[in-house]
Amino acid sequence: MTRYAAAVTPPSYHHGDLRRTILAAAVGAIAETGPAGWSLRELARRAGVSHAAPAHHFGDKTGLLTAVAAEGYTLFAEALEGAGTDLHDVGLAYVRFAVDHRGYFEVMFRPDLHRADDPELTAARDRADGVLMRGVRDVRDFAPGGPGDERTAAIAAWSIVHGFADLWLSGALPADLGGDPVAAARPVIGLLFTR
Amino acid sequence: MTRYAAAVTPPSYHHGDLRRTILAAAVGAIAETGPAGWSLRELARRAGVSHAAPAHHFGDKTGLLTAVAAEGYTLFAEALEGAGTDLHDVGLAYVRFAVDHRGYFEVMFRPDLHRADDPELTAARDRADGVLMRGVRDVRDFAPGGPGDERTAAIAAWSIVHGFADLWLSGALPADLGGDPVAAARPVIGLLFTR
DNA sequence: TGTACATCAGTGAACGCGCGTTCACTGATGTAC
DNA sequence: TGTACATCAGTGAACGCGCGTTCACTGATGTAC
């Protein structure tokens, strides 16, 4: 009943959730054609709203991409937190997020696309960074020793999962790895820990 | 004397190396504002040629980016070959290339920007792939054992250097790593081998 | 060596188009009384 | 409960602009004789 309430509600002059609709359309468009493969007008057409609506909510394309990145980092932090405390699992969650939320991921690590001083973006990114670093701090067993090694280990773990995700998304990895990026990443990441 | 011959040569109607000039301008523009941050007309202005010249040589933007990627893969293969046979050194050369030739690197792993069936691009990429894979095949000592492990090790090595380079270029890594990406990458990559 | 001609790299004016932006307007919603 | 009004999300027409593309033209170079 109420499940379909939104669908049967007669179209109103006020959309109600235009901001969210535009954001979702942007994420979809980015996943399909990259952060530069569309115009604000095209996005509005896609979302079924007037072409002036995106500007009304986000100002310009940079503002919209900043909002995408901010929401992306929030979802990212939640995904990593949900993976638990084992660094191996956090790494797999990293890869899974990148593949499942390509539209967010492709914008998050492109600061040239953001409004750098946006407080919402900064807060969301700091949160995600915190989760990543906390995960690493708990695992000293693959850092041979010494205080400097811990950070080196953190960057190595970050690099290997980030690199795998990026190569997977770009289609550069051999096709016979199969269709499941998380399964394919498991032994690769494992190589960093088991020795 | 002849060092400055090109500079004092009177301007001729025929440029002589327009293709190369445009290519160089494109690589510079990409390094500064990314593969989508400029138009063909803007590029022509930058190169000091007529706005119709880029189309004359490359057809459209995809054609130009395809040529950039093809030349990039050729330079990349040379850089990796020049690093020798030690996989650790090849990895550092990978990072150095990405940072020193950002304009090429940013296009190479973005197949959505290329004309996929371009024979020159395909040949250049195959060559670079060959160098990478040969480097890995020589180093079995960090693959715990078994034939499947060798490929896993190859992908792990590729992922860690690619990820480090990408994170460095995006500015995501902590600032106190210093200004030399190759020096910063050395212990990180080392973590994959020494155990 | 000189002349005539074909070739083709590169030019620049002109075009139509989609873009971002502006702005007066519409109409639903919330609030005061 | 009813009326009046303020607010503001969203619209749609109009604008000027830079873009990619086309195309007739220019002029340097190479070749034939």
Image: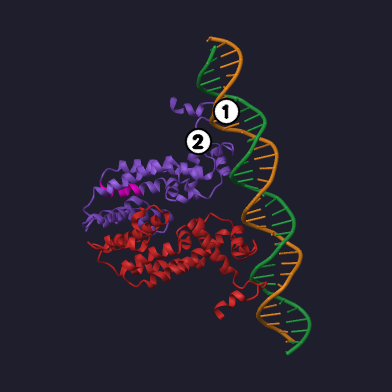
Chain colours: A purple, B red, C green, D orange
Q: Is residue B105 inside the magenta stretch?
A: no
Element carrying mark 2: helix
x 61%, y 73%: residue:
B16
Classify 10 Å Cα crowding around label 1: few (below 14), some (14-19), many (20 and above).
Answer: few
Q: CA distance from mark 2 to mark 1?
A: 15 Å
The disc numbered 2 marks a residue on which chain? Answer: A
**Is residue A90 inside the magenta stretch?**
yes
Residue A19: which disc? 2
- As helix, strand or loop, the secondary structure at mark 1 comes to loop
Q: Is residue A109 left or right of residue A161?
A: right
Q: Residue A31, which numbered label? A: none
Q: Position of residue B184 (x, y in %)?
A: 33, 60
Whether residue A132 appears in this view of the structure is: yes
Residue A58 spot, x, y in % from top left:
52, 39
| Front label number (2 vs 1) | 2
Q: Amino acid at mark 2?
A: Arg
Q: Which range is magenta?
A: A86-94
Q: Is residue A59 above or below residue B9?
A: above
Amino acid type for the residue under numbered disc 1: Tyr
In the rendered view of the protein, which quadrant contains the C terminus of chain A? Answer: bottom left
The subunit carrying tag 1 is A
| Magenta residues, dominant SS class | helix
- Crowd rating for badge 2 (residues with CA inside 10 Å; few <14, some 14–19, many 20+): some
Q: Nearer the viewer, residue A13 or A178?
A: A13
Image quarter in which the N terminus of chain A is found: top left
Instruction: Between residue C27 and residue A175, name the one nearer to us.
Output: C27
Q: Is residue A131 above or below residue D23?
A: above
Q: Earlier in the sequence, mark 2 or mark 1?
A: 1
Q: Which residue is mark 1?
A: A13
Specify the quadrant of the image occupied by residue B21.
bottom right
